[in-house]
Amino acid sequence: MKLISLIALTTLLVTLAESAPAKTCSFTVKDLKDGNEPLDTYVVTLKTPSNQNEAAKVEKNHFNLLKQCANKKIKNIFDLFDLDDKVLDQIQKDSKNILNFSVKGFSVYSGKFTDSFVKNHLSKIPEILSIRKDISLKNLDRVDEREFPLDGKYQSPDGKCQGANVYVLDTGINIRHVDFEGRAKFAAAFCTGCGKVDDNGHGTMVAGIVGGKQFGVAKLVNLFAVKVLNAQGSGFLSELIMGINFVVKEHEKSKNKKTIINMSLGFNQRVEDADRAVKNAHDRGVIVV
């Protein structure tokens, strides 16, 4: 009986410890909103102890604090990739959600707060290393200007390159992504055992930079997935050359000669065979980037 009681007591203490507030609340949900003050997105980085167990504990306690005191919901961004784009967009816009994108050795998240809450409450939490208001990336602004200072705007090329065919030699493209508006198609796969899908994500990211609706450089180009890299982002020289030569043949068959190859990949040494394939494509009228 004593043994059973001891086990029960231990279980109760562990349960209470896990459910107990990480800290005494120094703020409440009411503090999150100060009158009509607008919400802004902030990127918050936590101090990361060298001991991984301690780092995980710091992160867990901090998120418990936000859940229990501010009624925030913690969403791990890496668990959301398979969701419908509209659902994911709603999650990202919901001010109640904290988007956790921490990895080993780097605890970081984003959330929507007022300036007053950050100044009066969030900034005083000791485990926080830094808090920065989210800022937009300026890659597009830099693309359309040669000289500084940048004007803070992006001017698309005339016609937004409508009619140009860009072949993305990479891990594939998620052709159903809404940002491509139906302009992305599967063309060919040359890597061993590869299918038609982008099972890595890198190729889709590259295609988005090239011709995505929101942040693409050329927002109306046609995108073609030529899969030369597998799910691990690896491939062989032979498969790359197959991909390049495939595009050359497609270029020669097509009446549309606005053909571009994009290759965001490389070797750890110079490979003359790859250079020859690129030069041949260029000599036949294909632009290679």
Image: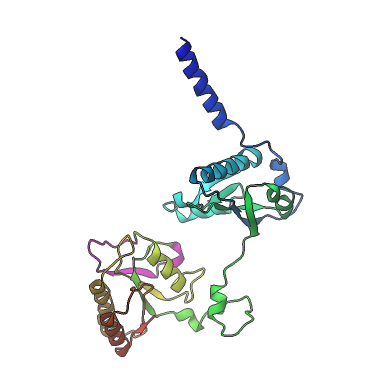
- Answer yes or no: is residue 254 visible: no
Which residue is rendered at x = 68% and y = 49% of the image? Answer: 122
Q: Is residue 247 above or below residue 136?
A: below
Which residue is rendered at x = 45% and y = 14% of the image? Answer: 4
30 vs 259, left or right, is right
159 vs 258, left or right, is right
Q: Which residues are magenta?
A: 178-198
130 vs 265, left or right, is right
Quadrant of the drawing holding the C terminus? bottom left
Locate residue 19, reporting x and y percent.
Answer: 56, 31
Locate residue 174, reporting x and y percent.
Answer: 38, 62
Question: 12 or 210: which is nearer to us?
Answer: 12
34 vs 148, left or right, is right
Locate residue 118, reporting x and y percent.
Answer: 70, 52
Q: Quadrant of residue 26?
A: top right
Question: 63 or 251: which is nearer to us?
Answer: 63
Q: Quadrant of residue 195?
A: bottom left
Locate residue 82, reporting x and y percent.
Answer: 41, 52
Which residue is rendered at x = 49% and y = 69% of the image? Answer: 213
Q: Is residue 98 above or below residue 140?
A: above
Residue 17: within the magenta?
no
